[in-house]
Amino acid sequence: MKQVTIKDIAELAGVAKSTVSRYLNGGSVGKATREKLDRVIRETNYEPNQFAQSLKSKQTKMIGVIVPRLDSYAASRTMMGIDERLTERGYQMLVVNTAQQTEREIEQLYNLAKQKVAGIIWLGTTVTERHLEAIEAIQIPVLLIGQQHDNVHSLVYPDYEAAYALGTRFTEWGHRNVVYVGVSEADIAVGQNRRDGFLKAFFEAGAHVKLVQTTFKIEDAIPVGERLAKEVDSTSLIICATDNIALGVLKGLANQGISVPNDVSVSGFGGYDFTEVLHPSITTVHLPYRRTGAKSADMMLQLLHGDDVPMKTFTIFELKVRESVDNIK
C-alpha cells in the first residue's frame, strides 16, 4: 500500500502543505481546520516519518538560508535583503554555504531542520527528486529563490522574459552575428531560461548565434574572451549569461588588444554594481536582488503564519543600456 504523505493529507483536507506541517508541529491552526485534519489523519492512518517525529519540539525564531556561493554578488545582496527584513520582524538568519554542490544542498536541508529553524529560504541552482524528498521529510516551510518547481513555493526572476527583451533591443540595433556565453543547463534559470530568451529574440530576427559554455567564475571566462578575440571580424556582439562572465570576457578581449565596443560589443546579465563604474560601462539586465531578499523574508513569514502564498511569484527586471554595446544599424 502506498505510504500516505503530507501532500496527500493536504489534498484530502483541502489545505496547504504548510498548514499540515504547522498542525503536526504543534503550531497555530484554526479549530475547523484542526478538526478536518484530525479526521483525515484518523481515516488514512497517517503516521509522520521518523525524521519528522524528531522535529516535534518547538522551532526557534531562526530562518535558515541556503546559498550556493558566499562570494556571489547576487547571493550577498539577496542575503542583505533577507537579513534586514527578518531583523525588523524579530527573526534571525542562519546562513549555510553549499559551494554549488547538490549533495551539500540536500544535506543542509536536513541539518537546518534538525537545528529547529522555523523555515528555510533556499537560493537554488537545480531541483532534483532528492531535494523534493528532503523538503517533504523535514515538514517545515521552504521557499526557493531563483529557480522554480510546482511543488515548492518559488520566488522567480523573469530570466526568459528579460533575456528576450534585451535580445530584441540588440536586434533592433542591427546585431545579427552573435556569440552567447552561457553556463550548464543544470541551472534552469541561468543555463536554460536566459539562453532561450536570447535565442528566441535573435532567431525571430534571422540572426546567427554561436553558443559557448563556461562556468560562473570570472577566471574561467577570461580564456573564453581570449579565444573569442580571434572571431571579432565575424562577430558584432558577445552576450554573457551573467555580469561576472562579462567581466571575464572583457578582460580576455583586452588581453588580446580588442577594444569594446569599437571592435565588438559585450553585454552581461544581472545588474551588479560594478557594471556601471567600469569603462566601458556594461549593458545588462538589472535584477533586484536586495529587494527580492526582503520579499522572500515576507513570503516566508506569511507561510509561517498560515497565510495563502502563491506557489510561484515573479520579480521585476530593468534593462540597463550602457556603453559596452553599440547600435550598428
Image: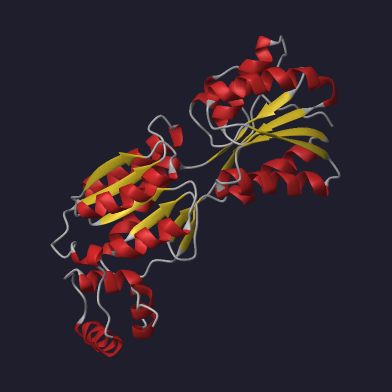
Residue 9 in the image: x percent, y percent?
33, 80
- Look at the picture and state if 98 lies above or below 113: above
Residue 198 in the image: x percent, y percent?
70, 44
Residue in the picture at 38% in, 39% down:
98
Residue in the picture at 44% in, 41% down:
289
Residue 208 in the image: x percent, y percent?
83, 38
The part of the image, by quadrant, that contains residue 50 is: bottom left
Colour setting: secondary structure
Mark yes or no: residue 26 visible: yes
Residue in the picture at 50% in, 24% down:
274
Residue in the picture at 70% in, 10% down:
256
Mark yes or no: residue 307 visible: no
Horizontal side, residue 153 vs residue 314: left or right: left
Q: Residue furthest front?
A: 1
The part of the image, by quadrant, that contains residue 279 is: top right
Name the one closer to the observer, 88 or 106: 106
Residue 176 in the image: x percent, y percent?
83, 36
- Look at the picture and state if 170 lies above or below 8: above
Name the one closer to the observer, 318 or 305: 305
Horizontal side, residue 303 vs residue 151: left or right: left
The quarter in which the N terminus is drawn is bottom left
- Count of numbered circles on the image: 0
The part of the image, by quadrant, that contains residue 329 is: top right
Name the one closer to the observer, 22 or 100: 100
